[in-house]
Amino acid sequence: MTIIDRSERGLTRHLLCAVPQLLDPNFHRSVVFLLDHGEDGALGLVLNSPMRTTLLEVARSLSLEWAGDPDSRVRLGGPVEQIRGWFLHDQPEWDTEADQLAAGLWLTTSLESVKRDGDGTERTDHLRFGADDAHFMFLLGYAGWGGGQLEAEIAGGSWVVVPVVEDGEDDVGVDVDFLFDCEPERMWVEALHAIGVDPQRLVGMQGSVGLH
């Protein structure tokens, strides 16, 4: 398991809330969780864009057992590589090779390690995902920025930055549970409220912002 060092990683582990005037349809009122941000660019996952595909359908296609809500939806993580899957979860025992993004938050990028026991042998039983005591999100695709691109967009007013704080931190922002518990249709509004921003004031702003 890798623990990601954020000491020199800019806005890694922050949310980006798109302003309503952002013209790119891929990011209309989107909430993006930044997995990585540095001099070479940034990579993030859109958290509030559910697809028609259900997690039950995905689990069955992978010979896994889905124990959660059969109507839980896959999220569209962004416009890039939409066949690439990402798993955000709070169960480190699922994948010993997962990246720990924060306390209580892990990222799995391949099911190959999940399908194997600790000694490397392939499991013969069905894995159970979505149990009541687990938080889990599956996303397809991601959002990416080149070096300096995200900084320019933030400076141009395209995004509002919202920190994701851990227990014991006094910073204003949302906690890890928010990422899993907040309904997609409420996430944009609630994330802005968490830092004292009135979404209605953003909606009332004049002009538009385009991405280039």
Image (cartoon, helix red, strand yellow):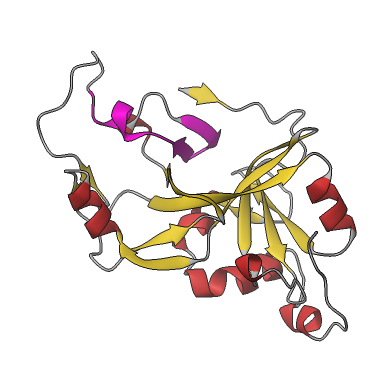
Q: Residue at x 64, y 66 (%)?
A: 27
Q: Give the camera-side residue of 212 and 71.
A: 212
Against 163, residue 10 (above or below) is: above
Total labels: the figure holds: 0
- 20 relative to 77 in the view: left or right: right
- 186 relative to 209 in the view: left or right: left
Q: Please tell me in which quadrant of the rendered image residue 22 appears.
A: bottom right
Give the image location of residue 154, x and y in percent: 83, 56
**Residue 17 inside the magenta-drawn segment:** no
Q: Give the camera-side residue of 33 and 194.
A: 33
Against 175, residue 108 (above or below) is: above
Q: Residue at x 58, y 52 (%)?
A: 175
Give the image location of residue 129, x and y in percent: 25, 47
Against 116, residue 107 (above or below) is: below
- 10 relative to 88 in the view: left or right: right
Q: Which residues are magenta?
A: 99-116
Give the image location of residue 104, x and y in percent: 48, 40
Observer able to see residue 66: no
Q: Residue at x 69, y 31 (%)?
A: 6
The quarter of the rendered structure image containing the N terminus is top left
